[in-house]
Image (spheres, helix red, strand yellow):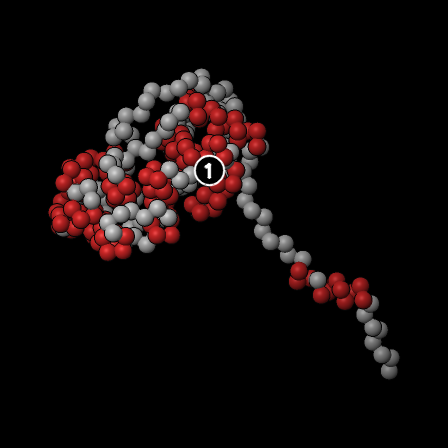
Amino acid sequence: MTSAKPKSSTQTLKKSNLGSRKRPAARRRTAYTKAELEEIFRRFSIQRPEPKGELEHVNAFTLVVAVALSAQATDAGVNKATRALFKVADTPEKMLALGEEKVRDYIKTIGLYRNKAKNVIALSQKLVDDFGGEVPRTREELVTLPGVGRKTANVVMSMAFGIPTMAVDTHILRIGNRIKLAPGKTPDEIEDILMRIIPEQYLFHAHHWLILHGRYCCKARKPECERCVIADICKSPERTCDVPAPLVELPQQVIGATE
């Protein structure tokens, strides 16, 4: 009986390395070059030098409330409901004094208003109990507030405290995939890409530029490519025009205007 031929050291090494051949999945990337990204955001900066969020608020607390209320609702609809509410309750203490039932009455024109009213009272209570009535500045603390997720926290950090963040809403989710700027399945994936690729000097205003571009130009049902200042750079398969619109500064935003 012949003995089995011993395996060579090369064969053994190959076999032992089979499990290590799998490479980790590559991080998702944009379809644009660094120069193209610079040009895209340069044009946005000329078109809207000082973009603003379109939720009306008077301080960090009312901003938190407004953004939390805006889930599955339009900014215009939230503004209509909160104008009267914020006149009587612009601090957590005043909101608690108002009570859940009266908060419900103010916001009943907003979708899911019953649950949102409950969250507004709960987050007000937590601010008083845990943060001395002040809105915290870190994402880790903000997301502990009832009804506040990562997107809301990012908006508050940016708009209330001037911290560069990327709040991925439905507009940015759509834009990221449609024009292949930041292809991803989840808001977190898209946020990760955008935070890595957007030129640093443009990062602070970037999420507002993208939101406003998606809201008023690259619209959900039908993008208005003839009005787009980046039509010649855009890599969307839906693009209908490759001639960019004139690069001029737009009229100043009127906060609270209807969409």
Give the side of residue 163 with respect to residue 86, left or right.
right
Residue at the image position 28 percent from the left and 52 percent from the top: 131
**Residue 238 visible in this rendered orientation of the protein:** no
Q: Which quadrant would the N terminus be assigned to in this image? A: bottom right
Which quarter of the figure has residue 251? top left
Q: Could you classify mark 1 by the number of other residues whose Cα lies within 10 Å: few (under 14), some (14-19), or many (20 or more)? A: many
Horizontal and vertical percent for residue 142?
Answer: 33, 50
Name above or below for residue 228 compared with residue 203: above
Q: Nearer the viewer, residue 4 or 111?
A: 111
Above or below — where is 179 with respect to 97?
Answer: above
Residue at 84% over, 73% down? 5
- Judging by the rendered image, the residue that carries numbered circle 1 is 176
Tell me the residue at 48%/20% (across/down): 244
Q: Position of residue 7 (x, y in %)?
A: 81, 70
Q: Name the residue rendered at 41%, 32% in the picture.
A: 205
Q: Is residue 19 visible?
A: yes
Residue type pointed to by label 1 = Gly
Q: Is residue 46 left or right of residue 253?
A: right
Question: Who is closer to the viewer here, 259 or 125?
Answer: 125
Q: Nearer the viewer, residue 24 or 43?
A: 43
Q: Residue furthest bottom?
A: 1
Residue 161, position as x, y percentages in the image = 35, 40
Quadrant showing the C terminus:
top left
Left or right: 88 as drawn, with respect to 216: left
